[in-house]
Image: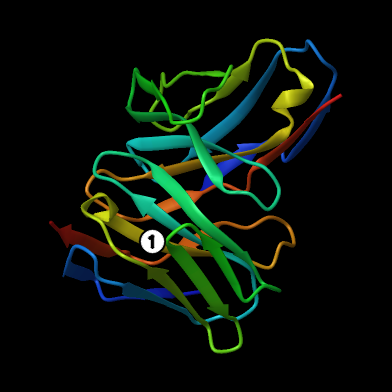
Amino acid sequence: EADIYQTPRYLVIGTGKKITLECSQTMGHDKMYWYQQDPGMELHLIHYSYGVNSTEKGDLSSESTVSRIRTEHFPLTLESARPSHTSQYLCASGRTGGFGYTFGSGTRLTVV
Amino acid sequence: KQEVTQIPAALSVPEGENLVLNCSFTDSAIYNLQWFRQDPGKGLTSLLLIQSSQREQTSGRLNASLDKSSGRSTLYIAASQPGDSATYLCAVRRVETSGSRLTFGEGTQLTVNP
């Protein structure tokens, strides 16, 4: 079934560790996004991509980086995690010309 | 299967008018509902989030209400401005069991004329 997948679902790591949050979609969507959302708060766009080798920073400043080497894959990396990075990270994808977006289930990250 | 409908599909108003955007959903077993704004070529900007136990949320000139039992939400925009021109989307998240996706409506395209 065409879908969007995020792994891991939950992650607890120590300060200073490097981590990569995975996001993959099998819908052939050209646009992909990473959002950050704290509990009960609004989503904030941190990165987006309109296609392979295209990445841009979003509205919210973030110390993370992303890559888009393949259409279906849009991983997000934190080189050195800090407690301030504790949050939920949501990946989404969409098709150029369409309004609809599909979000993944999210990764809840806790940095201790 | 959850279905989300937004009415109207498009709306054009003169600056200064108060307006209401409507959202309805078929499955009332939701975890929360969010209203988003999308500007051309940009990603989504979240405007308001209403938990299933809440009736409304307010932010500045925006007020969103939720009637879960009837499957309806409204977004009220007071004293509209040309900068409010965008597409407004509502999305519901189903009950949080094993994780869930947001289900979006098709949006209301709003134009506020100076």
Residue drawn at (60%, 29%), measured in percent from left and top?
A22
Secondary structure at numbered mark 1: strand
Q: Is residue B58 above or below residue B24?
A: above
Q: Nearer the viewer, residue A19 or A87?
A: A87
Q: Quadrant of residue A18?
A: top right
Measuring from the top left, give residue A98's x and y in whole percent.
Answer: 27, 52
**Seen in the image, is A97 located left or right of residue A24?**
left
Name of the residue lying farthest toward the bottom: B70
Quadrant of the rendered structure where residue A31 is? top left
Tell me, yes or no, if residue B56 can be seen here: yes
What is the three-letter code of the residue carrying label 1? Leu
Q: Chain of mark 1?
A: B
The colouring scheme, among rainbow, by chain, secondary structure or one colour, is rainbow
Q: Is residue B19 above or below residue B104?
A: below
- For the C terminus of chain A, give its image quadrant: top right
Left or right: where does residue A8 sit relative to residue B19? right
Residue A91, position in %: x, y?
53, 39
Tally the numbered discs.
Answer: 1
At horizontal 58% and vertical 17% (from top left) the residue drawn is: A63
Dot 1: within a 10 Å radius of its alpha carbon, few (fewer than 14), some, or many (20 or more) residues? many
Image point 18% across, 60% down: which residue? B111
Left or right position of B61 against B59: left
Q: Is A107 or B83 nearer to us in this picture?
A: B83
Q: Quadrant of residue A17?
A: top right
Q: Nearer the viewer, residue B1 or B63?
A: B63
- Residue at 33% across, 23% down: A52
- Residue B58: give x, y in percent of width and height: 54, 63
Q: Find residue A39 and report its horizontal and vertical position in percent.
A: 71, 48
| Residue indicated by mark 1 | B89
Residue A26 seen anywhere in this rendered image of the structure: no
Is residue B33 positioned above or below A50 on the image? below
Outermost residue, left side: B114
